[in-house]
Amino acid sequence: MALVACLLPAAASAQSAGPDHADTAWILTATALVLFMTLPGLALFYAGLVRTKNVLSVMMHCTVIACLASVLWLALGYSLAFDGEGALIGGLGKVFLLSVRRESLRGSIPETTFFMFQTTFAVITPALIVGAYAERIRFGAVVLFSSLWLLLVYAPVAHWVWGGGWLMQRGVMDFAGGLVVHATAGTSALLIAYAVGKRDGFPKELRPPHNPGMTMIGAGMLWVGWYGFNAGSALAADANASMALLTTHVSASIAGLVWGLLEWRRFGRASMVGVVTGVVAGLATITPASGYVGPLGALVLGICGATVCFFAVDVIKHRLGVDDALDVFAVHGVGGILGSFLVAFLADTAFGGVGYGGGTMAGQATIQLVGIVATIAWSAFATVGLIALTKKLTGLRAREEDLEEGLDLTYHGERAYTP
């Protein structure tokens, strides 16, 4: 009995040193859900919104970016984002995961699981930008721009916010990517949409989306996948993950209703594309706040996200004249930025949030503003440089004869639909 008593603490210690099986199982599941957001969710969502001659091109963009981002994240991106505690950028200690062993842990889960979860974020973020330049960009430009953007924009901001960088040290709130994903992609999308130029007939003579049903299917996949995106960001199977899933669903639901109501008041009917766009706006807006707010906060964020993004679409397209083809900035960028600011108020315990950990609402609002401004500024600065480099090396806008024929056939030799 004495021998057993001596061995029990050692056994318990050995057990606690390993990964938590429940947490690991949940993050493995969440990883699959987040990849499902891009392939096929985002690809179908975007494909339904373009003309028939460009359907495969946007699907190809999403697929190739998924492959590129995965390899680049393994080679360098993950190390730049999550190695070391430098203020601005990570180190090179985890390139190709050479220093990561099977038994290496990140919190309560294997580091390989954490790596794969973060890989799916690195996949969807540059893929979001596809919607800004759809139907008019050279395929080589997509490959070059997306590759460099991942390493020069996404990886540094991920380090600032999640990898031990200066914004994380200051306590910025970004639970699942309002800054890291939506603000970066949205800002860059607006700039590259302006640089690549307008589609023929923009904005009044453009044809309507060729397949709203396909867009609805893609949006449904995004909604389901977003549970892994937000609730998975708790990195544990715990109460925070449960609340993040709940707030994600509430925000998406109310946002879809609000967008439909706004369409009905303005146009006399609610459209399928409009309602699912509202859902996505609600999902983008709740993303940075999902683990910090309660159900009431989620309702407020969904209502605000749908309303502000609805009017942002009109401002970007009709007042600024920028052909952000599939509203990446107006929905993802504006939604992510709005949620990143409002979380400072809705995280208060009076609204069912988690509070400020000894800080104040005003102090948190200041931190959020600093994070928003820094993220937008760096994304814009780096994107302008990448656009100039891409123009020089590959060209940016497709030739007019290629645009007339359609990018499916001219760049990929295939058609989505047989004539």
Image (cartoon, rainbow, N blue to C red):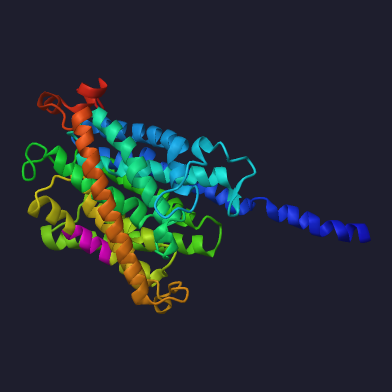
Instruction: Let me know if residue 146 appears in the view.
Output: yes
Q: Main secondary structure of the magenta part?
A: helix
- Residue 240 lies left or right of residue 143; in this view the side is right
The quadrant of the image that shows the C terminus is top left
Q: Pick the residue in front: 49 or 154.
A: 154
Q: In the picture provided, is 109 more to the left or to the right than 329?
A: right
- Magenta residues span 304-311
Quadrant in the picture for residue 142:
top left
| Residue lying furthest bottom | 350
Residue drawn at (19%, 46%) of the image: 191
The image shows a total of numbered marks equal to: 0
Query: How far from the left and from the top, in percent, is residue 247?
Result: 41, 63
- Could you say where residue 61 lies in the image, as x and y percent from the top left? 30, 33
Q: Residue at x 36, y 74 (%)?
A: 363
Q: Quadrant of the N terminus?
A: bottom right
Question: Which residue is depicted at the point 36% across and 67% down?
Answer: 298
Q: Position of residue 303 (x, y in %)?
A: 27, 66
Say which quarter of the image contains residue 267: bottom left
**Front one among 366 and 53:** 366
Q: Nearer the viewer, residue 249 or 288?
A: 288
Residue occupying the far top of the picture: 413
Left or right? Give the position of 331 relative to 202.
Answer: right
Whether 205 is drawn above or below 394: the answer is below
Eyeballing the image, is 113 above or below 59?
below
Q: Is residue 310 magenta?
A: yes
Q: Quadrant of residue 306?
A: bottom left
